[in-house]
Image (cartoon, grey):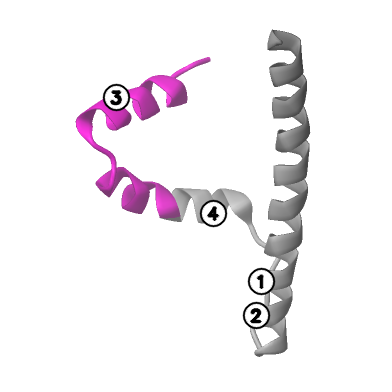
């Protein structure tokens, strides 16, 4: 019984991932069709540095502490 549940869960995960990907692509195409330009050639490092202060504003103390510990891992 346990094995059947694990197999069903794995199959459901694959189907869920496929549905999510298809929905994401459909939404992206709708936006493009309405005139949105999707920019993919970006300086990621510059974007990350610009977003860090904004993201930190939304973290609670526990999340901020976890974020700082992760960032300080060498």
The residue positioned 69% from the left and 53% from the top of the image is 20
Which of label 2 and label 1 is nearer to you?
Answer: 1
Towards the viewer: 18 or 43: 18
3D distance between C-alphas at marks 2 and 1: 6 Å
- Viewer can see residue 41: no
Relative side of 59 to 44, left or right: left
Mark 1 crowdedness (10 Å alpha carbons): few <14, some 14-19, many ≥20: few
Which residue is outermost to the left?
61
Which residue bears the numbered disc 4? 46
Give the number of the mark in front: 1 or 3. Answer: 1
Q: CA distance from mark 1 to mark 3?
A: 35 Å
Q: Are marks 2 and 1 in contact (CB under 8 Å)?
A: yes
Q: Which residue bears the numbered disc 1?
A: 27
Q: Position of residue 24 (x, y in %)?
A: 68, 62
CA–CA distance in space, label 2 to label 4: 25 Å
Looking at marks 2 and 3 on the same chain, the residue that comes earlier in the sequence is marked by 2
Q: Which mark is residue 65?
A: 3
Magenta stretch, main secondary structure class: helix
- Would you name the residue on which mark 2 appears? 31
Residue 39 forms part of the magenta stretch: no
| Residue at disc 1, secondary structure | helix
Q: Please name the residue shown 28% across and 47% down the image.
A: 58
Q: What is the spatial separation of the Cα atoms under label 4 and label 1, in whole angstroms?
A: 27 Å
Tell us which disc is closer to us: 2 or 4: 2
Of the pair 46 and 69, the residue shown nearer to us: 69
SS at mark 2 in the image: helix
> Would you place residue 40 above or below residue 74 in this image?
below
Q: Which residues are magenta?
A: 51-74
């Amino acid at each position: 019984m346990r094995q059947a549940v694990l197999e069903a869960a794995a199959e459901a995960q694959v189907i869920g991932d496929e549905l999510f990907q298809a929905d994401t692509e459909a939404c992206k195409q709708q936006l493009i069709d309405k005139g949105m330009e999707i920019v993919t050639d970006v300086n990621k490092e510059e974007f990350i540095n610009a977003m860090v202060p904004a993201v930190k504003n939304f973290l609670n103390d526990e999340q901020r502490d976890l974020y700082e510990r992760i960032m300080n891992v060498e």
